[in-house]
Image (cartoon, helix red, strand yellow):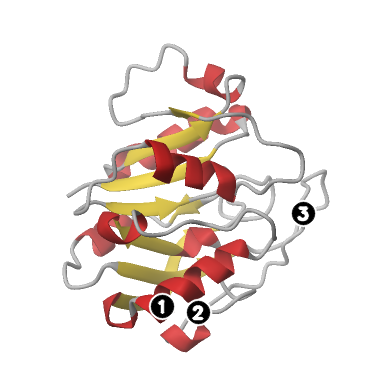
């Protein structure tokens, strides 16, 4: 069983930092790129980095369209685990190994660390440094979860799609998961992901 990371990819300047972050986790990384973003991986010789080419986004479409492109065009392995990360987020060290050892569930929801401060810079999203901590499946709801806070098995992934018209389509996706497959869900209270991890100044220990 592999753990795969589907990533709508835009930030070419973070390619090396993302590579260094994922490498010790033994994941398969799928950056979903248009032709321009794909240039960041020219000459890549690391077999675990597997970019996926997609059409360019139309202005106003959400990054979930790139995730859907992956679902619709790639071979989905039923036994593998699939996570969704934005290209400035990163899993907490050791967390993926923990999820990999849990065999009795197919859908994982987990908490998110948003850092220590909200830096004053030109970053387009100003998330406050307030974590989202999940304690039970009822807390998995719209506006209380991000796409980076879930991992699903392939046999579930192949049956799902993200909406692409609203900012909260990730929340709608999560609610659909817990509603349709309630017995397959596991909520992990501890932090599994750090949002905006590569934003300068957000995490004071970086």
Nearer to us of marks 1 and 3 is 1
Give the mark nearer the N terminus: 1 vs 3.
Answer: 3
Which residue position is annotated with label 3? 119
Nearer to us of marks 2 and 3 is 2
How far apart, in angstroms, are the residues tagged by discs 1 and 3? 34 Å
Is 9 situated above or below 142? above
Please report contact status of discs 1 and 2: CB closer than 8 Å, yes or no: yes
Residue at figure coordinates x 31%, y 23% from the top left: 46
Residue 157's spot in the image, x, y percent? 35, 56
Quarter location, residue 22 = top left
Judging from the image, what secondary structure is the residue with disc 3 in?
loop
Residue 99 seen: yes
Residue 166's spot in the image, x, y percent? 69, 60
Is 205 situated above or below 171? above
**Side of 54 where 79 appears, left or right:** left
**Side of 1 where 175 appears, left or right:** right
Residue 168's spot in the image, x, y percent? 65, 65
Quarter location, residue 171 = bottom right
Q: Residues within 10 Å of mark 3 (few under 14, many from 20)?
A: some
How far apart, in angstroms, are the residues tagged by discs 1 and 2? 8 Å
How far apart, in angstroms, are the residues tagged by discs 2 and 3? 28 Å
Judging from the image, what secondary structure is the residue with disc 1 in?
helix
Which residue position is annotated with label 2? 140
Please report contact status of discs 1 and 3: CB closer than 8 Å, yes or no: no
Nearer to us of marks 1 and 2 is 1
Which residue position is annotated with label 1? 178
Residue at figure coordinates x 50%, y 75% from the top left: 175
Residue 118's spot in the image, x, y percent? 75, 60
Give the mark nearer the N terminus: 1 vs 2.
Answer: 2
Q: Residues within 10 Å of mark 2 (few under 14, many from 20)?
A: many
Residue at figure coordinates x 35%, y 69% from the top left: 108
Residue at figure coordinates x 54%, y 50% from the top left: 89
């Amino acid at each position: 069983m592999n753990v795969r990371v589907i990533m709508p990819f835009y930030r070419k300047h973070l390619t090396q930092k993302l590579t260094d972050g994922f490498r010790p986790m033994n994941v398969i990384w799928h950056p979903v790129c248009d032709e321009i973003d794909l240039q960041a991986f020219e000459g890549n010789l690391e077999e675990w980095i597997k970019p996926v080419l997609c059409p360019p986004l139309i202005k106003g479409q959400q990054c979930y369209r790139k995730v859907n492109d992956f679902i619709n065009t790639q071979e989905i392995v039923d036994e593998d685990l699939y996570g969704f990360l934005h290209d400035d987020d990163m899993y907490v060290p050791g967390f993926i190994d923990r999820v990999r050892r849990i065999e009795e569930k197919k859908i994982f929801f987990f908490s998110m660390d948003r850092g220590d401060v909200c830096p004053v810079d030109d970053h387009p999203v100003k998330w406050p440094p307030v974590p989202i901590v999940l304690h039970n499946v009822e807390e998995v709801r719209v506006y209380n979860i991000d796409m980076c806070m879930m991992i699903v098995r392939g046999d579930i992934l192949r049956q799902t799609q993200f909406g692409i018209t609203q900012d909260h389509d990730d929340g709608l996706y999560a609610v659909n998961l817990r509603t349709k497959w309630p017995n397959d869900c596991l909520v992990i209270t501890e932090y599994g992901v750090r949002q905006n991890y590569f934003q300068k100044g957000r995490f004071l220990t970086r």
